[in-house]
Image (spheres, rainbow, N blue to C red):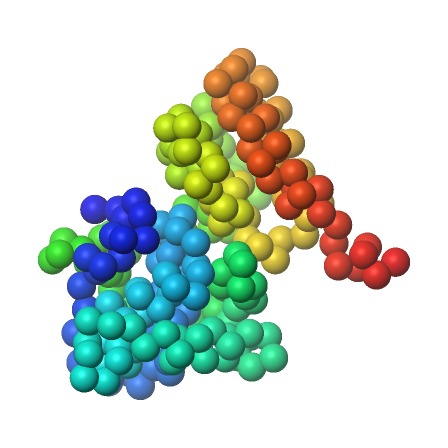
């Protein structure tokens, strides 16, 4: 099973507390694990979604005392603050867009994942995958295995393209754009534009008219994000 909407987070099973208690993971580590899976599922890592997933996975840590079915949102909000560069450096965050793990934060999430495994939905475990947009690989391996048609087919499986086909592009957010591009929120704007152009060139080379129309619609919807300048340029 793969969650399609935030409501599906209510079907996530609680983790066996003994699995993470013995490792004495901090609440920040557990929150990084939750944010990681929201990224895997291409779901906005908002304060609300993170609060619900934290409480579902780790009720003894993130549910309200005496009310295990309800998230302690204030506790999650406090841990989101602790993830920021000023503290642990696990993530950056924006109240409108959500939480985005840094390399340090992804490493923390992987430590927890190795210890407790992936989440499960109503008793059905998910494969221990990493985010589909974690494209770290050597250039040599990338050149040897790269297949343009397969690349485009994979992009078609992303949530943003599926919503486009369903006529629901208005329901998407920047996190879905990042999922399509295989990038992170702290990626430099010039790199975001470069990857977007690469996808357009790829679709053009393969003469995929539908995907080109999709990219046109995406560019129109996310124009401000795609055309934004880096922080250093804004200061100049």
Residue occupying the far right of the picture: 236
Which residue appears at 34% of the width and 81% of the height?
25
On the image, the x and y values in percent for residue 169 come to 46, 34
Which residue appears at 48% of the width and 18% of the height?
210
Residue 180 in the figure: left or right of residue 111: right
Residue 234 or residue 69, whichever sits in front? 69
Which residue appears at 32% of the width and 77% of the height?
72
Quarter of image, res 185: bottom right
Which residue appears at 24% of the width and 67% of the height?
56
Residue 223 in the figure: left or right of residue 109: right
Residue 80 in the figure: left or right of residue 48: right
Quarter of image, res 21: bottom left
On the image, the x and y values in percent for residue 65 come to 23, 85
On the image, the x and y values in percent for residue 9 come to 27, 57
Q: Is residue 83 visible?
A: yes
On the image, the x and y values in percent for residue 173 come to 50, 46
Residue occupying the far left of the picture: 123
Where does the C terminus fall, quadrant-wise?
bottom right
Q: Is residue 109 above or below residue 193?
A: below
Residue 173 or residue 150, whichever sits in front? 173
Residue 153 or residue 96, whichever sits in front? 96
Q: Is residue 88 above or below residue 101?
A: below
Q: Is residue 150 visible?
A: no
Quarter of image, res 130: bottom left
Residue 89 or residue 146, whichever sits in front? 89
Number of disc labels = 0
């Amino acid at each position: 099973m793969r969650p399609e909407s935030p409501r599906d987070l209510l079907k996530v099973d609680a983790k066996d507390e003994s699995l993470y208690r013995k490792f004495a993971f901090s609440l920040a580590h557990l929150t990084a694990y939750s944010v990681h899976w929201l990224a895997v599922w291409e779901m906005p890592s908002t304060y609300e979604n993170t609060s619900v997933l934290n409480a579902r996975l780790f009720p003894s840590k993130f549910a309200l005392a005496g009310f295990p079915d309800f998230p302690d949102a204030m506790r999650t909000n406090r841990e989101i603050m602790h993830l920021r560069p000023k503290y642990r450096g696990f993530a950056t965050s924006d109240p409108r867009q959500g939480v985005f793990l840094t390399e340090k934060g992804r490493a923390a999430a992987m430590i927890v994942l190795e210890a407790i495994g992936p989440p499960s939905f109503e008793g059905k475990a998910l494969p221990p995958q990493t985010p589909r947009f974690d494209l770290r690989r050597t250039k040599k391996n990338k050149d040897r295995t790269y297949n343009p048609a397969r690349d485009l087919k994979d992009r078609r499986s992303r949530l943003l393209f599926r919503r486009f086909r369903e006529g629901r592009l208005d329901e998407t957010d920047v996190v879905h754009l990042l999922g399509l591009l295989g990038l992170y929120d702290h990626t430099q704007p010039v790199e975001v534009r470069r990857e977007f152009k690469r996808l357009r060139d790829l679709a053009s080379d393969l003469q995929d008219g539908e995907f080109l129309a999709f990219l046109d619609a995406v560019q129109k919807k996310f124009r401000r994000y795609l055309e934004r300048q880096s922080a250093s340029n804004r200061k100049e």
